Image (cartoon, rainbow, N blue to C red):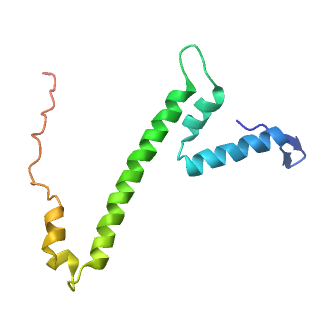
Amino acid sequence: MLTPERRGTVRYFDSEQQYRAAVIRVWSDTGRMTLDDIGAVMASRSATYDWRDTVEARIEAIDRHIEQLLVGRNYLNYVLECTRDNPYRDCTVFRSEITVPTGRRPPRRRSRRSAP
């Protein structure tokens, strides 16, 4: 949490608070960390929690996201290189790569209501 000093209506942040704000921005923007994640890391280690768990979870999430982005880029590059006028409609190779849902849904659970 940032705690500025107030002088009238103006807020002043000391160098430590400015550093803290900069770290929050970097971790939020580049590490895609939530404020809760950032707060947990900044709070340090406790008897029941190690901040490394939060960081490791974010690294794993980023790795999954990178993998998804690479797959997406590969599909888009393929579409650009396709010689068909409409790759969406006419490219059989691209069409074979796409998994089409079966349309089957799992059966709905009936809610149990207590008898009146």
Tell me if I can see residue 70 in this picture.
yes
Out of 25 and 65, give the one closest to the viewer: 65
Residue 40 position in % (x across, y down) = 58, 30
Residue 80 position in % (x across, y down) = 31, 78
10 horizontally vs 36: left or right: right
Residue 32, relative to residue 52: is it above or below? below
**Residue name at image x 8 percent, y 50 percent:** 104
Q: Residue furthest top?
A: 47
Residue 99 position in % (x across, y down) = 16, 58
**Residue name at image x 22 percent, y 83 percent:** 83
**Which image quarter: residue 109?**
top left
Residue 17, relative to residue 86: is it above or below? above
**Total residue callouts:** 0
45 horizontally vs 60: left or right: right
Q: Residue furthest right?
A: 7
**Residue name at image x 14 percent, y 59 percent:** 100
Residue 56 position in % (x across, y down) = 48, 34
Residue 56, relative to residue 116: is it above or below? below
- Quarter holding the N terminus is top right
**Residue name at image x 40 percent, y 50 percent:** 65
- Quarter holding the C terminus is top left
Tell me if I can see residue 4 in this picture.
no
Residue 47, relative to residue 108: is it above or below? above
